[in-house]
Image (cartoon, rainbow, N blue to C red):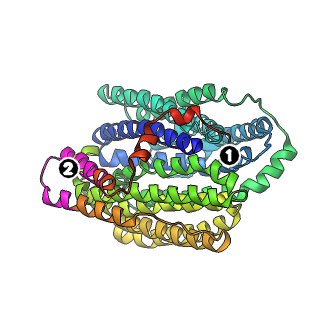
Amino acid sequence: MAVARKIAYNVAVSSISKFFATVLALVSIGFITRYLGKEGFGNYATVLAFLSFFAAVTDLGLYHISTREISRVGADEQKIMGNIFSLRIISSLLIFIISPLIVMFFPYPREVKEGIVIVAASFLFSSAYQVLNGVFQKNLAMDRVAIGELIGKIIQTIFIVIAVKMDLGFDWIIASLLFYMILTFAIVFAWSKKYIHFKLQFDFSYWKSFLKESMPMGITAIITFAYFKMDTIILSYIKSSADVGIYNAAYKVLENITFFPAMIAGLVLPIMSGTIFADRKRFEDVANKTFKFFIVIIVPIVIATLFLSEGIINLIGGAGFAQSAQVLRILIFALAFIFFGHYFNTILIVGNLQKKLMFVLSLVAILNIGLNLYFIPYFSYIASAYISVLTEVAVVILTFSLMKKNIKYSPKLEKKSGIFFSAIIMILFLFLLKGFNFFFLALGSVFVYFFSLWFFKTIQTSEIQSLISKKGVEEYEEIP
């Protein structure tokens, strides 16, 4: 199982890199929240919501479909990547050009409007390197992308610390994102040359045929933005910047963890894409192991957050964001369902069911926006938190039903009892030792949980060794 070891190695390296990048992101948020306060951080969150909006509008389904296509047997990678890269650059340039016109229609303060234009510039670079991710995914080399992002995150964090210490203001905090994207793009682009050499291509007939296939995923990206980020924009219109800040201090915790299911889904997407129709047994084996992995990871995250939310928020935002702890306890359940939303979405994409997925997510987006518009005026960020959970539950139920009906697959979970008893032991640890040091409880509970998994043979020693072994990389075999 050289491929399995290759995936495990990528997961290990990417996870470690992403872990440190997440720590740095949380450190940065800690500096930003304390420097800007609730209202300033609310403005910061509003600007980042527009970055997500730009990403959704220009997505066009290019990332997922190009990854799928270059993973097919006999794919012309240079033609695919040359055209897709050109298409992405043009769409990003259009966003940058029209962004000053977009902000004219919003009643935001000057600093927020300027920040939106800055993130539009940063999007030029982030969108370009994200397209290249497909090359790394096909070659099971996402560890390189993760390392590149970590280097960029280190520089961004240093930039933020300097901006705060020197009191450079809101615009410089936003500008740190631009420098991060430029550096990360440069690193990822340089490393991509190991796997593919391509030049910009403008085959408009190919663009037309590709967009016909990818556009459902592009629309899906806009829909996904609608139920992931519209709550922040609606809050910024209806309520104060302080409310936006309180909600997003908790939401930032989720955002810095959701990379993980997306990363795992991205790593297994080429394998699933190559086997779903050609080798059903192998496809189901990979899918089942991914499902088990998601269960094993999300259980301790939910348990730890329920017990330690005050400490988490205090670490991130300080005493001024105490209300965010309640929001985090609600949102953590949304995170749990986000894991499995990514899982089912990936299977639907490799099964060529993106059009049906688009329809399902459209219904969910309408539900999310409608509920937020109705309940936010009465219950503010608490309403948004509960609606986020409801939204993700709906995504999981509907995508699972779609997958089961059309692909005839249902995930199978082995050794459920071991996961259950490990969770109970973790809960007892946190309950009996509540009041102890936050870091002791956080690290200790995670250790107790994973030790219990090992004790109950839910995780085998060989599985742990495969995560840290580089031998599998050297024995890597091409995916048929």
> Can see residue 357?
yes
User: As displayed, is residue 95 above or below residue 361?
Assistant: above
Can you give x and y, in whole percent of width and height, for residue 118 in the image?
53, 36
Amino acid type of the residue tagged 2 in the rendering: Leu
| Magenta region, residue range | 428-450
Amino acid type of the residue tagged 1 in the rendering: Thr
Q: Is residue 47 left or right of residue 325?
A: right
Give the quadrant of residue 176: top left
> Can see residue 219?
no
Residue sitting nearer the eye, 425 or 401 = 425
Q: Residue at x 54, y 32 (%)?
A: 144
| Sequence-wise first label, 2 or 1 | 1
Can you give x and y, in whole percent of width and height, for residue 14 in the image?
48, 39
Is 435 magenta? The answer is: yes
How packed mark 2 is, by other alpha carbons closer than 10 Å (few <14, some 14-19, many 20 or more), is many
Residue sitting nearer the eye, 456 or 18 = 456
Give the quadrant of residue 221: bottom right
Q: Are marks 2 and 1 in contact (CB under 8 Å)?
A: no
Residue wearing tag 2: 441
Helix, strand or loop under label 2: helix
Can you give x and y, in whole percent of width and height, for residue 466 in the image?
46, 41
Q: Quadrant of the N terminus?
A: top right
Q: Residue at x 13, y 59 (%)?
A: 432
Residue wearing tag 1: 67
Q: CA distance from mark 2 to mark 1?
A: 41 Å
User: As displayed, is residue 155 above or below residue 8?
Assistant: above
Q: Is residue 32 left or right of residue 428?
A: right
Residue sitting nearer the eye, 326 or 139 = 139
